[in-house]
Image (cartoon, helix red, strand yellow):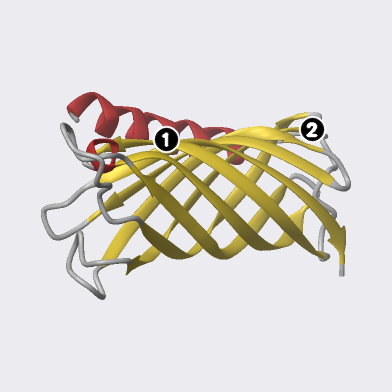
Amino acid sequence: MKNLSRLIKVTFAAAALFLTTQSKAQTTPANHFTFSLGAAVGVPTGNAHNYSTFNLGGTGRLQYGITNNFAVLFETGGDHFFSKKIPGTDVRYSSYGVIPLKGGVKGFVAPHIYLAAEAGAGFEVLEHGLFRDGQTKLILAPSAGWANNHWDVGVRYDSFTGDKNNYGTVGLRVAYGFQL
């Protein structure tokens, strides 16, 4: 867990460093909004790995270009964690979902290559009460990816922390976007 915490800190520091440098990758038009719809698949880490085999989700992201290579992000959607069988039985753990509400920044460090960092809240939705109903998690999500005027393909880590039950996902998001 310490290594994962260090990885998150290093990723955020690298994102801050790269986002403050000049780049000529004009993939985020300044003063324009872009909306994208994406699909994400991931592998649970931490406590979620004990109960879930993988997660699948969908996202809607609103992006506003501050400059041609730097944008602010607002994202929501839903993630469903598919449950594992309880060892030695044919019964499955309860499946669960998370509805994230995040804001963040995205900066292009080379043509079409970006680093992003998001933070927000995740609201758990439970099937049978595996975790306490109504639990809210802090989400920290560094990512890196490739994007052009319409497509965005990124690798990300989502960390969900709070109330003694911390977990995360390592995943891939593929999205299609258009200017508003």
- Residue at the image position 21 percent from the left and 66 percent from the top: 129
Q: Is residue 166 left or right of residue 119?
A: left
- When the figure is inspected, residue 141 is found, relative to residue 33, above or below; the finding is above
Instruction: For the C terminus, give its image quadrant.
Output: bottom right
Query: Helix, strand, or loop for circle 1?
Result: helix
Quarter of the image holding residue 125?
bottom left
Is residue 114 in view from this perspective?
Answer: no
User: Residue sitting at 87 percent across and 59 percent down?
Assistant: 178
Quadrant location of the N terminus in the rendered image? top left
The amino acid beneath tag 1 is Ala
**For numbered disc 2, what is the local secondary structure?**
loop
Residue identifier under label 1: 13
Q: Identify the mark nearer the N-term, 2 or 1.
A: 1
**Label pair 2/1, CB-CB below 8 angstroms:** no
Q: Which mark is residue 139?
A: none
Q: Quadrant of residue 85?
A: top left
Q: Amino acid at mark 2?
A: His
Residue 131, quarter of picture: bottom left
Between marks 2 and 1 in the image, the one whose residue lies nearer the viewer: 2
Residue occupying image coordinates x 28% and y 36% = 49
- Name the residue at the top extreme: 3
Q: Residues within 10 Å of mark 1 (few under 14, many from 20)?
A: few
Question: How far apart in space, not on screen, are marks 2 and 1 (Cα)?
Answer: 20 Å
**Percent of width and height locating residue 149:** 88, 46
Left or right placement of residue 29 versus residue 142 in this view: right
Circle 2 residue = 112
Residue at the bottom extreme of this rendering: 134
Label 2: how many Cα within 10 Å (few below 14, some 14–19, many 20+):
some
